[in-house]
Amino acid sequence: MGRLRFISTLVAVLAVLLGQRIYNLRKRALATRELVKNHLPNCVLLENLEHGSEDITILGDGLAFISTDLKFLGFPATDKPGKIYVLDLKDSQMKPMELRMPRNFDIETFNPHGISLYTDPSDDAVYLFVVNHPHRKSQIEVFKFVEEELSLVHLKTIKHELLYSVNDIVAVGADSFYATNDHYFENQFLQSYVEILLCQPWGNVVYYSPTEVKEVSQGYYFANGINISPDKRHIYVADLLDHNVHVLERKEDNALTRVKTVAVGSLVDNIEVDPETGDLWVGCHPNGWKALLFDPNDPAGSEVVRIQNIHSDKPQVTQVYEDDGHVLIGSSVAATYGGKLLIGTVFHKALVCDLK
């Protein structure tokens, strides 16, 4: 009888603890937020991008690079390898073109996530850094872009024990970068169930160079997008489950110190920075619970937020676009050029709109 009472008590306590964890997760996922429509004019879905466009970044001449076909955390995906597309935002046809991959690269296991561009000031060579998850592992691929051939030349693969669950990356040199680790565990089961229920601030930011690799910032519930200010003095980090963007100052030794935190009010994903104004454009998930459950009859929505004057005492956070999931599901990135807004998603389509 005593043993039965003990087991009953234990089950009750575990049920309460589990209930608290689920309640906390639903709160962080903004599960009760109602989705609405706040559309922009002249929006068009892009061709060829039917299975995600998780990250997008744009060169100064208006050429957008897009990573596609990500397999991540159980979200819907195809069994096809990932690809990199380019889109000339100056071309009225708005037709994405697939980049030709090198023969010496393992295309079959290519699973691209976050991307970053670096232009070498000495010769204007363009390098593309790609977070890759072959066999659900994390590594960084470095390519050189050959514009005349619309192709990529694979230069190196970077692996390191500190780069164990990489989400996004920002290049700061031809062979150096900052990267976010969104999880603490490498095992997918622990990531998808145990860690998400515990919901602890175990994410971090790592600096990598050929001569030094080190953790430079920690304490994120889900370290997601990362980018750099136009003057290269500050790093921006999105914390998905804390609904904010952190501003960090770069030091001479590439360490980072926190300056401020800007509340966004949505689950923030990737960050793009306008090189002229310094404005941050953030792809967001307005209701992460819907994204987590993925019910086609009750789809997750999409949201784009713009942050102006982020270094001032009163940054301006503005919703630029929102959809209830019937046009665009699971927005992860937004980037602008020439009065156009390009919106990508984790596993759905991509959209280009005119800015008002």
Image (spheres, rainbow, N blue to C red):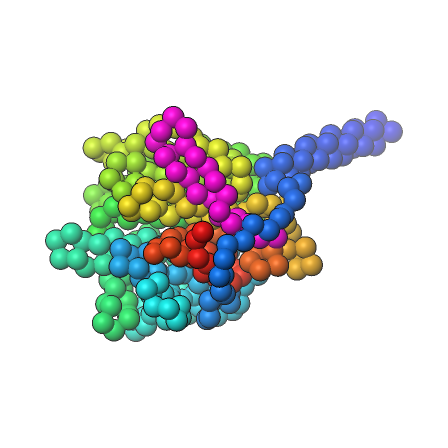
For the point 22% across and 48% down, the residue is 173
Kindly report the secondary structure that dominates the magenta region of the rendered protein: strand
Point out residue 88 in the picture as x, y percentages from the top left corner.
Answer: 33, 65
Q: Is residue 152 left or right of residue 29?
A: left
Is residue 197 visible in the rendered image? The answer is no
Can residue 165 be found in the magenta stretch? no
Point out residue 204 in the picture as x, y percentages from the top left corner.
Answer: 41, 38
For the point 44% across and 63% down, the residue is 68
Quarter of the image with the N terminus is top right
- Identify the image quadrant of residue 91: bottom left
Q: Which stretch did the figure color magenta?
A: 303-324
In depth, the one of 113 and 308 nearer the eye is: 308
Q: Is residue 129 left or right of residue 335?
A: left
For the point 43% across and 43% down, the residue is 306
Is residue 39 visible in the rendered image? The answer is yes
Can residue 321 be found in the magenta stretch? yes
For the point 28% across and 71% down, the residue is 150
Q: Is residue 172 left or right of residue 16?
A: left
Q: In this rendering, is residue 258 above or below 226?
A: above
Q: In this rendering, is residue 321 above or below 234?
A: below
Q: How many marks?
A: 0
Point out residue 300 in the picture as x, y percentages from the top left corner.
Answer: 61, 52
Q: Residue furthest left?
A: 122
Point out residue 345 in the picture as x, y percentages from the top left corner.
Answer: 49, 57
Q: Is residue 298 left or right of residue 9?
A: left
